[in-house]
Amino acid sequence: MSYSCPNHCTKKSSENKFTIKKDGVYFRKSDSRMIQRFLCQICGKRFSNATFSPCYRQKKRRVNEILFKLLSSGVSMRRAALILNIHRTTVKRKLEFLAKRSKERHEKLLKTLEKGPVTHLQFDDLITIEHTKLKPLSVSIAVDAHRRIILGAEVSKIPAFGLLAEKSRQKYGRRPNHHAKGLSRLFNSLLRAVDKNALIKSDEHQRYPEFVKKFFPSAVYKRYKGARGAVVGQGELKKIKRDPLFMLNHTCAMFRANVNRPIRKTWCTTKDPGMLQKHLFIYMDFHNSILVR
Ligand SMILES: [Zn+2]
């Protein structure tokens, strides 16, 4: 725990050890703990052990860990609020707090992967929706096929395709296509965590080769034809004997099964792509730190 003054005056003092004095304790009701208070003798500022905590000023810190698990186990935000006996607005705020924490942990994980880079990468896109099927979203996902670590998931808006394209344009106007930006963000974040000569596998999506060529020019890149979805695994596991993209498809199925927004035929749809991105960060962290390790 840091004992330096929040006003940074201890840095100016040469004997900084003696400028901070203990100044009593207080009882924190939200988790029944005694918290030490301090006084800075230079500026007279009072602070405590809680001041530097990421949970500073939270009133429901007891539910953070259980909410982290519920949101990564297919429970909706409203049902989590009911189970934990907290308001749904609190769940929304906590989702944002947990997502920020998970994002930081994910960045740390990618940093540690630089020492033992990924040698077999698989990536693909998972299609989900923003409130209606007329507004699809694409989630670009990358996994380490050896260690099963999820390396990234980037949400981007895409226009409706196929039979719904015309109807979507009539009802909501032209929808921008941010797929290329999403893929760029994903590959950019992986640059240092993936070995330059890694084996990279994907399906035969027409835009993929340009990104692999741009970001990993010396990698061995293999493409496979898509297959029909099996009944199990949310349509992500394929109806063939040996799926070359199994690890990726299995991860997509895990996303769909454990984050309630991209589940097929759900009524818990995403209303805001930004919140889906945050929810995916929470699941990625849960998957990498609890399921895989
Ligand atoms: Zn001070």
Image (cartoon, rainbow, N blue to C red):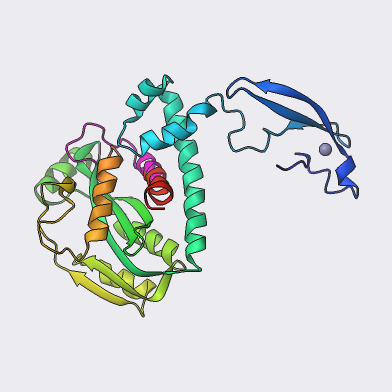
Q: Give above or below for 82 relative to 93.
A: above
231 with respect to 216 (left or right):
left
Provide residue 144's location: percent of width, then percent of height.
35, 62
Closest to the observer, 177 or 191: 191
Q: State the extent of the magenta-drawn residues as a range.
A: 262-279
256 with respect to 163 (left or right):
right
Q: Give above or below for 23 relative to 286.
A: above
Please state, as top left, top right, bottom left or bottom right, where the N terminus lies in the image. Answer: top right
Task: Indicate which quadrant contains ligand 1.
Answer: top right
Q: How many marks?
A: 0
The residue shown at (48%, 32%) is 64
Provide residue 142's location: percent of width, then percent of height.
33, 59
Closest to the observer, 97 or 166: 97
Residue 174 visible somewhere in the drawing: no
Provide residue 83's location: percent of width, then percent of height.
37, 22
Q: Is residue 198 magenta?
A: no
Quadrant for residue 204, please give it: bottom left
Quadrant for residue 4, please give it: top right
The residue shown at (83%, 44%) is 10
Provide residue 176's location: percent of width, then percent of height.
28, 51
Q: Is residue 270 magenta?
A: yes
Residue 82 visible somewhere in the drawing: yes
Q: Which SS does the magenta portion mostly show?
A: loop
As drawn, the residue found furthest toward the front would be 293
Quadrant for residue 275, please give it: top left
The residue shown at (54%, 28%) is 61
Q: Give above or below for 257 relative to 119.
A: above
